[in-house]
Amino acid sequence: MPGIHRFLGFYLLIGLIQGIVFYYSDQLYRLSETVFFVTYTVVLVGGTTLQLLGEKARQWRSLLPTLAFTLLMGGMTLWVCYGLDHVGNNRWAINSWFISVVVLSYVCATFLFAWPAEKGQRWRYEDLFQQAWNSVFIVLYALILVGVFMLLLKLWGRLFLMLGIEFFERHFWSQLFLCISLPLVFALGMYLAARSEKVIGQMRGMLFSACGLLLPLIALISLLFTLTLPFTGLGRIWATGYSTPILLVLAGAQLFLLNGVFQEGVQPPPYPKWLTRFIELSLLCLPVLAVLAFYSSWLRVEQYALSPQRFIALAAALLCGLYGLAAVWAVVLRSPVWLANLRVTNPALALLFCGLVVLVNTPILDPVRLSVDDQVRRLLDGRTKAEAFDAHYLRFGLEKAGEAAYAKLQVDLDQERILDPESRRALRERMEDTSLSFSEQYEKERARRPKPELEWIGPEPKGSEQFAELSLNTDSGCEPGCVLWAVDFDQDGQPEVLAIPRTSYRHDFKPPRIFVLDDKGEWDDRGPLVWTQLPDGYVDTETLIHDIREGKISLVKPRYRQLQSSDMLLTPVVREP
């Protein structure tokens, strides 16, 4: 029992470290995005894999590879972020890598947890299978525990809030409490799930029972769809524009259910002989579905050139085809154990998948770079007509690599080093349509916009020339014009500026805005001036402007003072009867 408690402390220590990192995440991000991402990768990947490793963490043959894998993932994150620092913000690369981290952590952690206990032994498929599914259900159990914990905290806070006690509601949802408590509860859930083999086994058994029930149905769907194709033709598939994801989902679902029935690969099939043969026949459709998905994406590439999304679709179809061929090969190779060859191909394909995921995040198979190269190559060799070239997507849809290729195309076009005269003319027209970014187009339209009429009542304060520029903003209240009046609202010797829009009708109502001169010498919009006696705060701006001109206006000290409560400043809005 003391050993168990000490090991629980190991789980909670990991959760505490994760919580501290979460709490200081803002400071880490302000320090450096690279430090933030690397720290999160090490803490989440390392912490979660060590918790999943369980009592095997006592064995150096299991612990050292896990620590090495954690450092490897942290190093790869550092390498990816370091590269992004030199090319600018690349949202595709960031999103791609962190999705890859989750996938790599799951697959590689399965091999780490099934690491042979003694030197010279090889991985056993039974251990890989058990660890792969146990990891899913252990994490799911911990997440469910965290969800229930948060619901109970909400219930606790609301109950006492009804009694007028705000302490629990305020502190249970504070950043400090959530950042520390949730990782600790997650760690406790991981500990309980890792030691509840019976519960995890029951959850796994329920899933496999569902797989056994659904596999014949999806086999029927797959077989009927494939047999219908010769009669309907493939034209309808290509015309949809979304055939690739549907075909991949069908093939992927069949492979998932098949492995749920296959399990460790030592038990006989749970079906009568005729149904087993029917399922085997449906497995022959898997390569066909993968080829159709691949060809469907390739047709889009031929029509519109390569894009990162189409590259991922092609890679997924290729991988699905390999899994399909492995299933067909297992059917062809008859053995005493049903589909026994899957015990060999599944681990190999999983490692191949990990290698492909890593390469996608390197310059070797970078989808963005490959897409840029293909877009430009097709334009230059004539496969893409100049008048159909998507210059906007090249410049604004393919990150920094697309911008660089766009700039090079522009230089080559100006120097007439590419294409024929007619194609150059068409390409020049296409590029002129996208010569400005959204921000540049906004600035151009902003410069064309007629300047609102600004009228100052009384002396103009320091920096008053800034209002000519501020009035051009799309959210400015000075359209079509406004009256400006310098007045010292807070009696600190430095006047503020009241900007009063010229609005003639109530439905065009825009409240006057108060501008304050900040420490940088810039006028900053700090908020509206409203008439609190009316529900909508409507101000008759024409009357207000008239009264300012006539001097019929004065500053009045508020009758009701404001309330200061912790970090809240409360202002009473009292309407006179």
Image: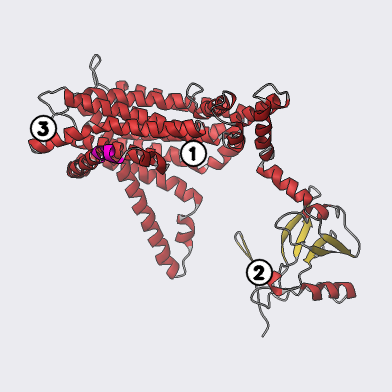
**Going from the N terminus, do you reach mark 1 or mark 3 first?**
1
Q: Is residue 503 left or right of residue 137?
A: right
Between the C-alphas of marks 3 and 2, the distance is 75 Å
Residue marked by disc 3: 268
Let me know if residue 226 is in the magenta part. yes
Q: Quadrant of residue 215?
A: top left
Q: Quadrant of residue 474?
A: bottom right
x and y, in percent, of residue 516 in the image = 78, 57
Residue marked by disc 2: 571
On the question of residue 114 being in view, the answer is no
x and y, in percent, of residue 5 in the image = 29, 38
Let me know if residue 259 is in the magenta part. no
The magenta region covers 225-232
Secondary structure state at the residue bearing disc 2: loop
Name the quadrant of the N terminus. Answer: top left
Q: Quadrant of residue 393?
A: top right
